[in-house]
Image (cartoon, coloured by chain):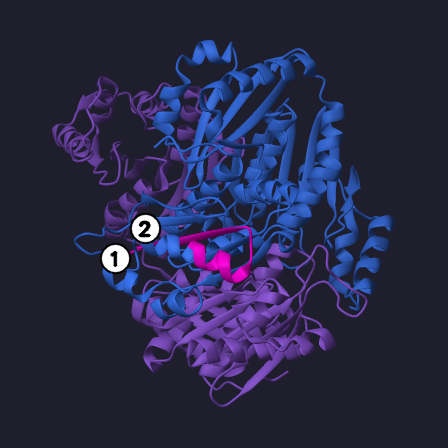
Chain colours: A blue, B purple
Amino acid sequence: MKAYLISIGDELLIGQTVNTNAAFIGSALSDINIDVIKSSVVADSLEEILNEFHIAFQMADVIIATGGLGPTHDDITRTAVIKFFDTELVMDEKVFEDLNEFFKSRGRELLEINKKQALIPKNSIPIRNTKGTSPGFWIEEKNKFFIVLPGVPIEMKEMMSNFVIPELKRKNKSQIITQRLILQTTGIPESVLYERLGNLEELLDGGKLAFLPNQYGVKIRITVQAENENECSNKLVEIEQRIRGKVGRYIYARGEELLEETIGKILTERNLTLAVAESCTGGFIASRITDISGSSNYFERGVVAYSNAAKVEILKVNEDTIQKFGAVSPEVAMQMAEGIRAISGADIGLSTTGIMGPTGATYNKPLGLVYIGYCDEKVCYAKKFLFGNDRIINKQRTSQAALEMLRRNLLRIPDED
Amino acid sequence: MKAYLISIGDELLIGQTVNTNAAFIGSALSDINIDVIKSSVVADSLEEILNEFHIAFQMADVIIATGGLGPTHDDITRTAVIKFFDTELVMDEKVFEDLNEFFKSRGRELLEINKKQALIPKNSIPIRNTKGTSPGFWIEEKNKFFIVLPGVPIEMKEMMSNFVIPELKRKNKSQIITQRLILQTTGIPESVLYERLGNLEELLDGGKLAFLPNQYGVKIRITVQAENENECSNKLVEIEQRIRGKVGRYIYARGEELLEETIGKILTERNLTLAVAESCTGGFIASRITDISGSSNYFERGVVAYSNAAKVEILKVNEDTIQKFGAVSPEVAMQMAEGIRAISGADIGLSTTGIMGPTGATYNKPLGLVYIGYCDEKVCYAKKFLFGNDRIINKQRTSQAALEMLRRNLLRIPDED
C-alpha cells in the first residue's frame, strides 16, 4: 500500500507553523508497513486542494489530508471533498450529539457556526473527535482509502491512533512485514559508532541501518523485512545482540524512551534519591528530570547556583576554591555535587559548571568548557567536557552528559576515556 | 513571484525528521513578498525527484529544493538536476578550495568521496557553504530561479540568509509589497482576544489578521499590502496602535521575541535582580531565564524545592503552614517567593507550586491547580491558576504565567482579574 499525505493551510506554507502532522502520520504509517511516497502542503484554496486530490488519488492507495475542517470561512476542505467525489454534505446525528456533548461539558453554547461541523460527506464514515469539535471522515472508493482529519495535532493524533491506524492495518493485505527498532545511544559520536560497528553487512544480515544524530546522541534505526512478524522479531533480536556486543555500553534504551525516563526507572527500582546543583545548565537538568511523572519519588531538590554567592551560601562551596580555581573548575564541580548531596540528604548529588556562550570565554577556559560533578556515598569526582559555541545546544548536551554520567554510575559502567 | 519548495529525503516521509526546513524557507520567502504556493516532500528516488522538478518548474518562478547533496549513495539530487537541465557536472575550483580548507581546519583528511562534492551543474553558480561540505547551486533558466541547497538546517539557513534571499530580493520586480507584523500576547484566550478586538474590518482597514495560539499565548499576525514599503509600514503602525488601544496590556513583544527575553531586557534596564523558587515547574522557569545570554547579570539563583524538606530548609517556609494549608496553597507560594528573595538578596522573588499531573490531584485540589507567588520590596502576593491535565503543557503554561506576572509587576500593569 502506498500513501500520499496532504497538509492544508497557508500557515504551513508561510512557515508560521512547522508541519509536525506529516511527520507523525508518516511515522505511524511506516510502522504498519505502508509506504509514504509523497507528502505535500497546499494553500487554503479550493482549486489547489482539488488539484492535489487528483494527483494523490492517481498515485496512492491511501490518501490522508489534514487541516481546513474548522468552522470559519478559510476552512474549505469539506467543500473540496464533496466537489472531488461529486457528492453532498449530510448532517450526521452521532456527530451532532458529540458536538452538543462537547459544548455542554465546557459550559459553552453551541453556536450556529459550530453546527456546520456536524455535516459530513454523504459517501463517508465519520471519525469521532474526542478532543475537539471537527470530526474526521473515512471514504472508500475504487479500492482506495481517502481520509480527512483536523489539523490540530492533538485531535489528529487521537484519530490516527484510535481509528485510522487500526482500520488500515486490517485492510492492508501485503505479505511483506517491515519492522523497525530504535536503539538510543549517547556519549559516542556518529563516526566512532560507525567504526565500532565494523562490517555492517555482516552485522545486519539483510537488514538496514540508519544513524540519526542530534544533540542528545545518535539513534540507531534498524529495519528488517520478512514474511511474518516472528521472523522479523527474531532478526531484530539477533541484530540487536550483535550491536550490543560492540557498543552496548552507549545504548541507554530501546525505542523512543528519553534518558530522563531511563534514569527515573533505575532510581525507582533501586530506591535511590537524587539532588542536582546546576550552574551552567540553569535548571534544565532539574526540569528534564521533573518532566517525568513520578519523579517526586526520587528527585529531592535542585539548586540553580548561578551566582558565586549561591554556590557558597547554599551549596557550601569553599570561597577560596572559587578564588583559586575559578567557578568553572573540577574542584568547584565536585564541591557542588558534594554540597547538594549533603544538604539534601539525597543518595546522589550531580552538578554542572561551565561556559555556555556566546560570551564568558577566557584564554584558559574556552567556550563550551564544562565540568560535571558526581557524588554518591562511595565516590565523588568531576569530569571535563568540551562542547561547542551555541548556548542552547550546550545546555542540552551538558544535561545529557550529566544524566549519562549518572546512568553509568548507577549501572557500574566504567568510563573508557 | 511564486515559489515551490521541494524537500528531498526518505527520513522526512517516514517521519524520522520533522521538516523544519520548509517552514524556515517559507517564512523567509514570505518576508520578501514571494508567495509560496506549494511545498512537497519526495523520496530519495531519481524518478520521483525528476517528476517533482517538472511539476514545480511549470507552476512556479522560484523553485527551492533541499536535501540529497551529501557524499553517499542515497544522495542523488545532483544527478537529478543535471538530468533535468540536460547538462553535466563540472569541478568548481573555488568550491574545491573551500572543501580543502574545511577539512584542513578540522584536521581531517579529504577523502575521494568528498571530492565529488565540488562537482556542480555546468549551468549553475555555486552557493558557498561555510558550515559544511556541500555547496548549493543557483540556476537561472527561462526567467525562473532554480535553487538547490543542502538539507542540514544550519547550512541551508546560512545560504538562504546570505545568498538566496538577497539575490531573490534583487530580482523580484513585483509592484506589490507585503509586510507582516507579529504581536505576542499572553494571559488572554484566543476567543476573548477576538471579542475585545471588536469589528475586525474597521480595525484592519484592508489588512488581514490571523490568531496563532499555542501553550505560551496567542500571536497576532497582521498582514498588509501596498505599493511601497512606506505605505505598508504606515498601515502596520496604525493597525498596531488600534490593537494596542484594545488589548495592549496583554502584548509583551513585537516580532518573534520570547517572554524571557522581554523580562531580561526590563530587568537589565532597571538594574534589578531576580531569584526563583520552583516546585511544580521543576527548574523550567530558571532554565528559560538562563537560556538568554547575559542572564547572569540579573538572575541570581533558583531553587527547585521539590520536596517539603527543601521548602522548609532552604526557603524557610513554615512547616506549620505546609501542614495546615498543604504544599499547593497561596500561603506556601507566598512564603516561597519571600524566602528565595530573602536568602538570595535579589530584588524580586518568584515562586510556583501546583499539581502538574497526571497524578497527585485530591478532592479539593484538582489537576492543573497552580499558585504563583511574587515578592518585591513593596508587595508580596500569590495568584491562583487552573490549567489542564497534561504535565508538560502545565509546566509550560505555569512558567509563562509566572514570567507574565513578573512583567506586569515590573511595568505596573494592574491585574484585571
Is B347 above or below relative to B140? below
Q: Quadrant of the C terminus of chain B?
A: bottom right
Is A318 above or below relative to A272? below
Q: Residue A74: tell me if it is visible.
A: no
Is A169 above or below relative to A409? above
Would you identify the image quadrant in which residue A74 lies?
Answer: bottom right
Magenta extent = A337-358
**Disc nearer the start of the sequence (2/1):** 1
Q: Which structural element holds mark 2?
A: helix
Kind of residue at disc 2: Pro
Residue A325: image tag: 1
Q: Nearer the viewer, residue A212 or B239?
A: A212
Measuring 72% from the left and 42% from the top, which residue is drawn there? Answer: A159
Q: Residue A73: tell me if it is visible.
A: yes
Q: Would you say A388 lies left or right of B6 here?
A: left
Kind of residue at disc 1: Phe
On the image, the x and y values in percent for residue B71 come to: 30, 23
Marked residue chain, label 2: A
Measuring 52% from the left and 42% from the top, which residue is drawn there? Answer: A41
Q: Are marks 2 and 1 in contact (CB under 8 Å)?
A: yes
Marks 2 and 1 sit apart, C-alpha to C-alpha, by 8 Å
* Residue with the mark numbered 2: A330
Marked residue chain, label 1: A
Measuring 66% from the left and 11% from the top, which residue is drawn there? Answer: A227
Q: Which structural element holds mark 1?
A: helix
Q: Would you say B166 lies left or right of A205 here?
A: left
